[in-house]
Amino acid sequence: MRWLDDNRSPSGSVVIEQVIHNTITLDVLVVGVVSLDRLHLGSNSFHTVGGAGMYTAIAAQSVGASVELFAPCPISMPSMLKQVDDCLDWFGPEILPDELPKMEITHHGNDVATLNSLEWGAEIKLDPEDLPSDLSGCKMVHLAALSSAERQLHFLEECRSRGAQLISAGTYSYVVQHEPQAVLKLMKEADIFFMNENEATGLFGSVGNLVVDPGKLVFVTLGRNGAIVLTDEFSGNIPARLVTELDPTGAGDTFCGATLAGLSRGILPKEAATTAINLAGLVVTGIGPQALLD
């Protein structure tokens, strides 16, 4: 695919040099998890919902995309998840509530955080064989963070075999540190890739050293400094709005979901990312995903 920065159709939508199947019924299918999180913000601690899959799906939906989330789903919904369940189309293997993934994160400020603990729980029950047999009706399939980059690669291969037209993926610091080659392969195989500045530095030494293959689209988030969109032909900086940050959890995944929603509707990458960076700025002013649910 070639992502064109300035060519538009007569209707004003971006021209993408790829034939999209005319039976599309869904803008974005997200593969990921919903988690129960404990957050430490300064001297305060909070219990909230989280998960890269959840943030990505709700963000995409909040800006108008039709979205479904493939994630382990509790047979009885914890009260903390009821608002998420009410607003999100969510399917996947049925699990007990205590099998949900759990994370504990301490935010230190200045885009620095510590992942104190991570239990993937029933994430292992996510099986690409359980995906819909025909994914040609999805404009985008996004592979959010899973327990390993190898797992994401397995899903990517299966999604391709089921007719997925465009596949995006994200990553996180642990797999960049422990599976760098698998992450690089995932980046190479995906059409669109999302990472933050620290992850890009871990893979390439610096954001400036990042090389994008022809036909690929890469987004690098820079915390309070916004984001960068890159192809092999152009790059663009997207500044962030100045906000009073309370909880930065999920900001990158919010950016990802809103960007994918825009791309699925034919919006230029930089324009889609501008809308997304503004939504991410809104999310960090609250606790957890509440700004996306209100």
Image (cartoon, rainbow, N blue to C red):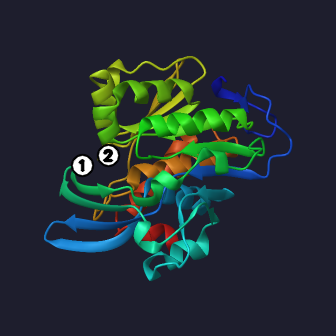
Q: Quadrant of residue 67?
A: bottom right
Question: Horizontal placement of 242 versus 70: left or right?
Answer: left
Question: Horizontal placement of 215 versus 26: left or right?
Answer: left
66 vs 263, nearest the viewer: 66
Q: Quadrant of residue 168?
A: top right
Asked if one can make out residue 40 in the rendered structure from this viewpoint, the answer is: yes
User: Where 269 falls versus 23 (above or below)?
Assistant: above
Q: Position of residue 224 (x, y in %)?
A: 30, 48
Tell me which residue sits at (44%, 46%) in the image: 145
User: Where 95 falls versus 76 (above or below)?
Assistant: above
Marks 2 & 1, CB-CB < 8 Å contact = yes
Tell me which residue sits at (50%, 50%) in the image: 276
Q: Quadrant of the N terminus?
A: top right
Q: Which residue is mark 1?
A: 111
Q: Residues within 10 Å of mark 1 (few under 14, many from 20)?
A: few
Question: What SS does tag 2 mark?
Answer: helix
Outermost right residue: 22
Tell me which residue sits at (39%, 42%) in the image: 239
Asked if one can make out residue 254 in the rendered structure from this viewpoint, the answer is: no
237 vs 155, nearest the viewer: 155
Q: Which residue is mark 2?
A: 223
User: Where 153 falls versus 49 (above or below)?
Assistant: above
Q: Position of residue 140 (x, y in %)?
A: 66, 43
Q: Residues within 10 Å of mark 2 (few under 14, many from 20)?
A: many
Give the mark nearer the N terminus: 2 vs 1.
1
Q: Which labelled disc corresponds to residue 214? A: none
Q: Amino acid at mark 1?
A: Asp
Outermost bottom residue: 79
Q: Amino acid at mark 2?
A: Gly
Tell me which residue sits at (58%, 48%) in the image: 127
Q: Position of residue 160 (x, y in %)?
A: 67, 33
